Image (cartoon, grey):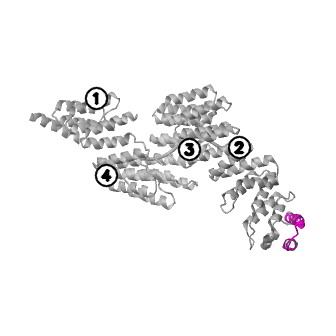
Amino acid sequence: MSTIRLSEIIVKKSLVTSEIPGRAAEITKILTISGLKPFKENPSLLSNLNSELTNLILSNPHLPLHTCTLFYDLLKSNISPTPLKLSLQTHLTFIIRLYKAEKFREIKQVLRFLISDGNLECPFEKMVSFVSSECGDSVFIERFCDLCFGVCVEEKMFEEANGIFDYMENMGFNLDERSCILYLIELKKCGRGYSFLGFFRRMVESGVEISVFSMTTVIDGLCRRGEVEKGRELMNEMAGIGVKPNVITYNTILNAYVKRKDFRLINEVLSLMQKDKVEYSAATYTALIEYFASVDKHEEVEKLFDEMRERTIEVDLHLYTSMISWLCQRRKIKRAFALFDELNDKGLAPNAHVYGALIDGLCKTGQMEAADMLVNHMQNQGIHVNVVIFNTLLNGYCKKGMIDVALRQLAIMEKKGLQPDVFTYNIIASWMSKLKRHEEAKKWLFMMVEKGVNPNAFSFTTLIDIHCKEGNLVEAKRLFQQMEGRGLRPNNITYNALIDGYTKKGEMKDAYKLRDEMEAKGIFPDIYTYTSLVHGECSFGKVDKAMRLFNEMQQKGLVPNVVTYTAMISGLSKEGRSDEAFGLYSEMISMGHTPDQRVYSSLVGSLHTAGGH
DNA sequence: GCCTTGCCCA
């Protein structure tokens, strides 16, 4: 019935302008009563609608919003044989309708369609001028601009977003702080050279209402770039104009200092919190626990964990993960699983991070079957195995010498559509290198580059180490320079690899130069550094120099290990300094070291040498 | 519309 009436209304050609409103009202009425049924039964009706008609229908307040939305979706879906190209006005008319019902999320959806659709030519100012002429409500226009800004940000169309910001500033409109926060977050994610601080200052200047949320977002961005001091300055500055930091702001700065392992500054933040009467949150405890775990202060970790449980602060999933991870690093698997049970009992839903920490614990203790079972279990719980967990397994199998099984895991991972990352390649290459399979190790590192994965400091260190072990110092040094040129920071392991390479060739001058260089950079020479130097001097007959190093390292609080003692004893023995060699031997035993065959043959040799004199 | 911090791999 209604289908026939509708077609009578629409199909009639050459509609006189004055007749249009009447038609629109009739169609609206039919839609209100019968819904979309007539159009669905006869899609060709759609092609008979023109822009004017549809706009009148969509803007008719008598049409229920629900039906209106269905009608709009139908128009957009193009089910008619000769699809109607919707005009910009039609979309905007619908947006105005949505605004009247305060359906902001839906407005954004339409805007996302308009703005991200490349085919639809839709300059912002054209949209604003249409919206202004249709609906003079200045509150709406301001809101409309804000929504456009938000959508541009979400679609990462930063240029357009900036344009809208400029426009709004000129018009004296206010942007919503939330939209600006979204912009700040996107900037942070992209990590581009764009200045958060610059945008934030613009926000302040153009009168955007600033809350602790946007301030904290900016401070976090600064902290991530290593500009913690700037972050703190901003915090002080904002406090001066009434924006007070909250626990999250403090946690953000605290975390930056935890990463730096700077106890003095950590304490400074804690006393600021105390002064401001800001209570610790679970995240504060997590940060502090992470700090103490990183500097091996086990009692402090336990104390903090107990302390927070005594208070009424709920231990959350993050903190459980940190604790479980810490216990697993220390091979305390039983306690880690006890905490896992506890969090489950509390009704917290374990995620991939928690499982990852536990799986790592099992891998570290060589319990690969159990690790495998846990992987299956998590999958049964509907949690996907990610790259990190695959890497953990890979490393676990390599550690057990099961490289083939590890490579099978890699194949499974790739089959799942997970791309190996820099960790994956580094793990395989470094284990290959440890097994002296240098060519294969290099192959994996080159493959990484071919696959477009950027090598990091670890990758360079692995490769440098390989070249040093092969005695190719020219290549090692070249890679070292290349690495620094890329802004990658060598660490003590990188320096130790190089120093070991030089000492093995007797190029002691260069070795000492590198030692000085690392010290100048604030990287402390460790037991490996000294052992290489001691070994180098001993190998080339400079036993007194070696002895001086041996004493120097102990003055610095470094405890010689079996390798150091062995090098020193064999150096002394070769010179026939049998008494000193035996003296070190008993010292080594009293330190609890177990000497190996090399030590004995050296000592025996020392007697021969001494006897020969 | 309900934003900002911390958790797993070498």
- Name the N-terminal-most of marks 2 and 1: 2
From mark 1 to mark 3, how far is it between C-alphas?
50 Å
The amino acid pointed to by label 1 is Asn
Taking depth in this image into account, of A338 and A173 the one nearest to the observer is A173
Q: Which mark is residue A436?
A: 4
Crowdedness of circle 1 by 10 Å Cα count: few (<14), some, many (20+)? few
Residue bearing mark 1:
A551
Q: Is residue A28 magenta?
A: yes
Q: Which residues are magenta?
A: A7-31
From mark 4 to mark 1, how far is it between C-alphas?
33 Å
Label 3 secondary element: helix
The amino acid pointed to by label 3 is Asp
Q: Which label sits in the foreground, 2 or 1? A: 2
Residue at 63 percent across and 27 percent down: it is A276
Taking depth in this image into account, of A260 and A130 the one nearest to the observer is A130
Taking depth in this image into account, of A298 and A19 the one nearest to the observer is A19
- Name the N-terminal-most of marks 3 and 4: 3
